[in-house]
Image (spheres, coloured by chain):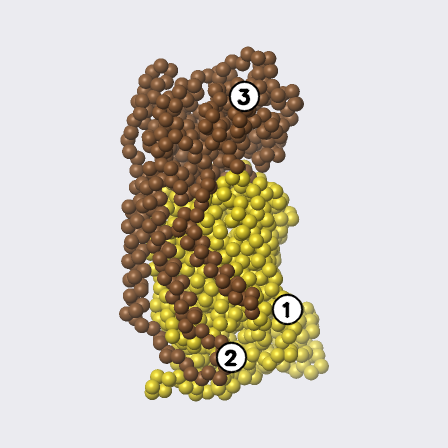
Amino acid sequence: MRFATLARALSWTPALLVVAIATGCASDAELDTFAPQGPIARELHSRGVLPVFWIAAVVFVGITVAMVWLIWRHRVSSYEGDDEWPAQTHGHVPLEVGWTVGFLVTMAAVAVIMVLSLPTVDATEVNKMKVDIDDRSVEWEPTVVVVGNQWWWEFRYYFGDQVDLADLRAHGDAKTLPPADIVTSGQMMIPTGEEIELIITSRDVIHSFWIPALNGKRDAVPNRFSPWKIEASDPGFYFGQCTEFCGLSHSRMRMQVVALSPPDFQSWVDSTTQDAVEPTDPAALAGLEVFSGICTSCHVIEGVNDDVFERADQASGAAPNLTHFANRSTFAGAIFNTYNADGSLNRIQLEAWLRNPGDLKANYTVPGEQYRGMPDLDLSEQQIDDLVAYLSGLGARPADWIIEATQVE
Amino acid sequence: MAITEKTPLELGPGDTARYAERPLGVFTRPQEGRGWRDWLSTVDHKRIGILYGASAMFFFLVGGVEALLIRLQLAAPEGSVLGADVYNQVYTMHGVTMVFLFIMPLAAAFANYFIPLQIGARDVAFPRLNALSYWIWLSGAIFLNTSWIVGGGGADCGWFCYSTNSGVAFSPSHGVDFYAIGLQILGIASLVSSVNLIVTCLNMRAPGMTLMRMPVLTWMLLITQFLLLFALPVITVALFLLMFDRLFDAQFFNPDAGADPLLWQHLFWIFGHPEVYIIILPAFGVVSEIIPTFSRKPLFGYEFMVFSGIAIGFMGWGVWAHHMFVSGIGPISVAAFSLSTMFIAVPTGVKVLNWLATMWGGKLRFTVAMKFAVATVAMFTIGGLSGVTHSVAPADTQQTDTYYIVAHFHYVIFGGGVLGLFAGLYFWWPKVWGHFLNERLGNWNFWIMLVGFNLTFGPMHILGLQGMSRRIDTYARGYGFEFWNMAATVGSLLIAVSVLIFMWNVVKSKRDAPHLPPPGPDPWDARSLEWSIPSPVPTHNFDTVPQVHGRDEWWHTKYAENDEGQVVRVATTEEAAQTGEATGVHLPSPSFWPLAVAVGLPLIGYGLIFNLWLALVGALLTIASLYSWAMEPVDDPDAAHDHHEEHHEDDDADPDEESDPR
């Protein structure tokens, strides 16, 4: 049967796949786990991932070659008229003990790999950097509290000693965290060359924070504060995706880390620690009015409603802080670009989002129950235009290279 | 114990004094017959095995359609075949269906059918319990799937259903309620069955069948039953808590009330990891029967095979937290569970090499069953090795919850479990049905399934390492996911084609059977006791209970080794096999009560969700049926002294008639 021959040839795909994997097949995949970009991820990759892949590949090749040889060597087409039986070997204890020990030794080697690479993801070096806030220079031990929400990430920067992991673990509550110096979402800015300690938690269900180029992942568990860390060697743009199933729009819960040189990071801190700018042009003023009437029940803008804001109708009790909305090159859980490739505002996307968010990102908005995701607000086209005018003026436009890196096609 | 009617009864024509003292009314035990109603009351382990198998194959199709929907949705970026909400339900129900409604019951089919045959018994220890386990399983399976119709959709929390996403606030439809209650019902079925089969293995073996002479299939199934016995109570506890959280506002998993969501994860995986071995060990057993038969050699290292199976059974309990390496359980726990996970690879690796050593120097005859069996070893090896790669906890932080894991466990569960059980279907089909499955169609089935399987799940390794997250209903362009997702979807369609070929094979083989020579008792020149009796197996299994002298008893009846160590035939199959013509064999009587008990359970389930009065009705039905079961006479006094086959002609008619108090 000719088909069977073809099929037999095709059944070699697994072997080819392993070869493809071992040689690092992925090229321009933004989330590629085989393309580490920071010291932690690099060490994890070279000490934890690659050695065990090689061991597995060798064992795989050994077993497969043996099996193919056996099949080729001992194959008969039929027992018809064949009364001769092969030697009836019931076993061979030394041999069997031998390969039991062989596997034990192999796995012991894997165990050594594990023990050696385990500290790479977990240990925290104590490092400090200087950051200027409001004309004051502080020693910052880079820490960012990362909070998962359905379906977006919040990043809270504390430059003083407002938070402490042990304290948070003892009596912290993700829904009532102390006020932070910077609250942003979707896109996390970090300085290069610094190990950033993350404290990961969640306000609703379990999420998982993962920037493959910078480190492995860590779950965001409600009622738990888990330490994690990332570090980027060079300025750059690193993508992430929530990896723990978190309900309806799990697939559309993404995140980005932007690594900036320390001076760039300082100027980002300078601009984002400011309250929102007061709009001047009439459309933006009208937009502020719409915001204060409608959006204000869930979203916070520092200097506008932070003093009166209580709690969002969201199941998580929170919605993204919009104070520096235009400073981020992404919105809606890091799924849409705020700017087009040419640097102009991505007005079409922003308007579509305000028109009916549920069309673009599955949500749950049954009246009388807590919202999950941004509800359809029934805005008029005029209100949408005004809001776009207002929001696009909140914060400085990010650098061109950031806008460019945000475009994934 | 039975309530009997003592007054003289009117005798029917041809009846003698046998109705002089009859159990009253519904407590009469029905008799074995051949009509469809007899399938409802059967306690014959073979019929129950067939029921399990047929129902499992039905749910294989259901789970398969769900799988195809998943693959269609993911074929291209920004897929819109299902939408997020339905996708989450479909992928959840795909997992639940394939695990609980396909592989477990298909393995149960093999266990029910072949454990008694392989140990030389005439039935299981508790025949009515056996029927009960099947009917409860079926009622749970139907209950679970009715959530599509009456529950506002299937469960949408993943088969692992992590807290807090499983709470009412985050999953407001009744899907998760059906999940929580449905799995409890299915758990009762597995528990009942495991107790029954453990007792059967330990107490019902033929004389001389010591434990270390039991065929390896029976051994692996026995270990599986112990795993079920200890694993299911744990998940039942978790499901019970979840049910109370959802239906009665308990706070077991509410973090706002101080709960730790990891509690659910520990409970789930203490069940969930042994579950992996519950799925794979039966397939290991099947492979261990088929490879020796078609290598013309005994299994290499029987003791190592048995003890490595036992070792897996034990060590399987100490690795659960490797599902939680990134959950924040702390570095010490991570290191400990990482180590234990690595060392469970040792007994598994030993098994693989022992299978290869069995083939070594043999005469390998590649029937379809043998092809499936060898493919099982090859594909499971890939799944096992990818498992080793993420047993290294730091590496796992990159791989967990990506498609790499999806690839890994499909190589284990599909490549190991499903291919293994398909090997078993081709191998034992003639024993069960008295005719072969068509080998030519079987070859098409095998090759298309193998290629389709590798094309579906092989690329998922790459997708996962490229960072494609699990359980996402769609993905964006530009992340390098397009090509391999399309390949996987094409592969899944090939698997669908191969399953259709299998179904066609079942029909065609049955249709062709009358024109082909019957397979006889021992078509493969095999080794264990089930091949010493006619095909299909007579109701009473063995004419005389065999005396067992060693391992591979049936093979040693046919063959011996001469002084030079050469194998010589000492008896033909015809001479040695039993004829199936024994009469007067005492067999357990059928009963309708297991079915009645099972009907009550889903009523309780619906009642808990929709209206507690209905739960009361279900509970009353179950309790009343259990009492009636207890009041039933142990046996139909009439059936004892007659050969069952001869009963059929006159009693076939109507079991209801039998229940009439005359």
Element type where label 3 sits in the image: loop
Residue visible at 46% across and 63% down in the picture = B376
Q: Are marks 3 and 1 on the same chain?
A: no
- Tell me the quarter of the picture where residue B88 sits: top right
**Residue nearest the observer in this picture, B288 or B468:** B468
Find out whether the residues at labels 3 and 1 contact each other: C-beta distance under 8 Å: no
User: Residue reaching furthest right?
Assistant: B13
Image quadrant holding the N terminus of chain A, namely bottom right
User: Seen in the image, is B67 located left or right of residue B322?
Assistant: right
Question: In the shown orientation, is residue B579 left or right of residue A57?
Answer: right
Q: Residue at x 50, y 64 (%)?
A: A8
Q: CA distance from mark 3 to mark 1?
A: 67 Å
Whichever of callouts 2 and 1 sits on the residue coming sooner in the sequence is 1
Q: Chain of mark 3?
A: A
Q: Classify B339 as above or below A2.
A: above
Q: Which amino acid does the dot numbered 3 rest on? A: Ser
Question: Which chain can be seen in brown?
Answer: A
Q: What residue would you read off at disc 1?
A: B507
Identify the amino acid type marked 2.
Asp
Location of mark 3 (residue) = A392
Check disc 2 and report the residue beneath it: B522
Which chain does the numbered disc 2 sit on?
B
Which chain did the renderer colour yellow? Answer: B
Q: Residues within 10 Å of mark 3 (few under 14, many from 20)?
A: many
What is the distance, in whole Å, between disc 2 and disc 1 at their CAs?
A: 23 Å
Secondary structure type for disc 2? loop
Count neighbours of disc 1 (C-alpha within 10 A) and say few if under 14, some if 14 to 19, many if 20 or more: few
Secondary structure under tag 1 reads: helix
Query: B342 or A365, which lies in front?
Result: B342
**Residue drawn 45% across the image and 50% down it:** B461
**Can you give x and y, in whole percent of width and height, for residue A358 in the image?**
60, 33
Q: Which one is closest to the eye, mark 3 or mark 1?
A: 3
